[in-house]
Image (cartoon, rainbow, N blue to C red):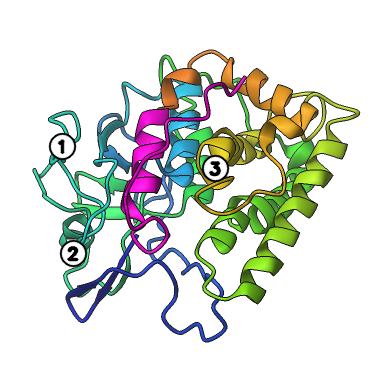
Amino acid sequence: MGLLVDGKWADKWYDTSSTDGAFKREASKFRGWLGSDEFPAEANRYHLYVSLACPWAHRVLIIRALKNLESLIDVSVVDSHMGQYGWTFGQESSEHLDRLYQSDYMWQIYTRAKPDYTGRVTVPVLWDKKNETIVNNESAELLRMLNTAFNTFDGVDAELDWYPKPLRSEIDAVNDLVYSGINNGVYRAGFATTQASYNSAVEELFFALDKMEKRLESSDFLVGSQKTEADWRLFTTLIRFDAVYHGHFKCNLKRLIDYPRLRDYTERLYNTEKISETVNFSHIKSHYYGSHATINPTGIVPVGPAKLF
């Protein structure tokens, strides 16, 4: 992340308007809809910008893979390390290039879409190559779009519905708890700048994890007897938990492996066809430990954990 303010880059990990030391996430600003009249579903018209470290981008990559959309939507991956100017292309590897414009930084994509853009520069981003603009940068909405927008295209798994109508109200309720307590909860703990805000975030985080552990007593998945969007939204935080959130973000009351049901659940999801290919632990660890200088000023990346499953 980072902020563009009056055309200048501000390397901030929290909302600068916060006075209580709590991490506050800014709402996404590009909210177009894939499949609308403005952005109709077309093969090779759209491009994803992602980080392999980012859990929000990861869940979009998962749905892209599971729906077999790889041939319809191509991808650019930023470097793992986020430096002074935010998400960066091509300094670590020739594999991490802006495949459309050869940009050096992700903020240049935002200002290409909106020259006077002010706000956070985040991933994922769905880019419209035809109109040269950002369609949407809200991962929760991108999941819904990719779930249905290309269902009439050859090769797409149209029968695979991650947000089925009979389960939507329950999925939404689980998503609300998982987002506030767990997905965003680890960030609220990690980027807290007062003891009180940190304590509050950690308490809510482990309360929510305990509830998810209890929920899995009676089912293999969070909603009904099938995998849904809710599972993938939780998975991207759980798969990172022991490697980065437990230590780096001080979420250390328990580890994932201390939750037997959540641990087994995470392994089942990880072993789903095509999912392990979306997980890059080297990228994840080097990003978190190497990019957050206020939390880990030495930039040392730990060698562990030795075993996740």
Residue denoted by label 3: 144
Residue denoted by label 1: 97
User: Magenta residues: mostly which secondary structure?
Assistant: loop
- Neighbor class of circle 2 (other Cα within 10 Å; few <14, some 14-19, many 20+) is some
Dot 3 or dot 2, earlier in sequence: 2
Q: Position of residue 148 (x, y in %)?
A: 52, 34
User: What residue sits 50% from the left and 42% below the top?
Assistant: 244
The part of the chain drawn in magenta is: 281-309
Q: Is residue 203 above or below residue 268?
A: below
On whether residue 263 falls in the magenta region, the answer is no
Q: Quadrant of the C terminus?
A: top right
Residue denoted by label 2: 111
- Neighbor class of circle 3 (other Cα within 10 Å; few <14, some 14-19, many 20+) is some
Rounded to the nearest whole Å, what is the CA distance between mark 2 and mark 1?
Answer: 18 Å
Rounded to the nearest whole Å, what is the CA distance between mark 1 and mark 3?
Answer: 27 Å
User: What residue sits 28% from the left and 39% below the top?
Assistant: 46
Q: As rendered, which of 305 and 216 lies closer to the eye?
A: 305
Q: Position of residue 188 (x, y in %)?
A: 57, 63
Residue type at tag 1? Leu
Q: Point out the frontmost of discs 1 and 3.
A: 1
